[in-house]
Image (tube, rainbow, N blue to C red):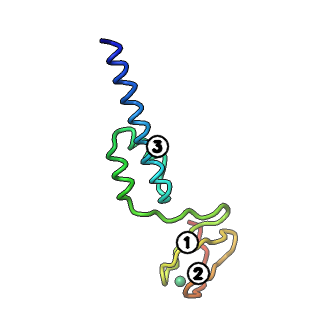
Amino acid sequence: MSEDLLGMLVVSIFVAVVCGLIASGIASSKNRSGGGFFLLGVLGPIAIIAAVLAAKGEPPAPAGMKAATCPRCNALQNVDPSQEQYECWQCKLAVPNVAA
Ligand SMILES: [Zn+2]
C-alpha cells in the first residue's frame, strides 16, 4: 500500500520535472525566462501550452551592450553604453544615450 503511494509520488515528480524541462526548453528558444517556465511546468503540463503560445521575446543585448529602441522609428538596436549618443541603424537619427 505505502509502496504504491511512493510509486505514484515518484511518477508525479518525474512527470512534473519533464513538463518543466519541456516548458523551459520552449521558453528559452523564444528568449523567454526558462527558469520561470520550468517552475510553471512543475505545476503541470499547462506550462507547455503557455510556452508554445507565448510570443517571442526580444533577443537579449550582447555582453557590454544595452538594448535601446529608437524614439523615431522604434527600431531595436544594441548600443554601447559608454558612448554619449548612438546613431539609429535604420533612420540614422542621432539619439542621446540616456542611462536606462
Ligand atoms: Zn530610428
Q: Are marks 3 and 2 in contact (CB under 8 Å)?
A: no
Residue hosting label 2 = 95
Give the mark, 3 or 2, whose residue is nearer the N terminus. 3
- Residue 18: image tag: none
The N terminus: image quadrant: top left
The C terminus: image quadrant: bottom right
- Circle 2 packing at 10 Å, graded few (<14), some (14-19), many (20+), is some
**Mark 3 or mark 1, which is nearer to you?**
3
The structure residue drawn at horizontal position 67% and vertical position 70%, both measured from the top left corner, is: 80
- Residue 68: image tag: 1
Give the mark, 2 or 1, whose residue is nearer the N terminus. 1
Regarding mark 2 in the picture, which secondary structure is present there? strand
The structure residue drawn at horizontal position 34% and vertical position 43%, both measured from the top left corner, is: 45
- Residue 21: image tag: 3
Residue 96 image-quadrant placement: bottom right
Marks 2 and 1 sit apart, C-alpha to C-alpha, by: 10 Å
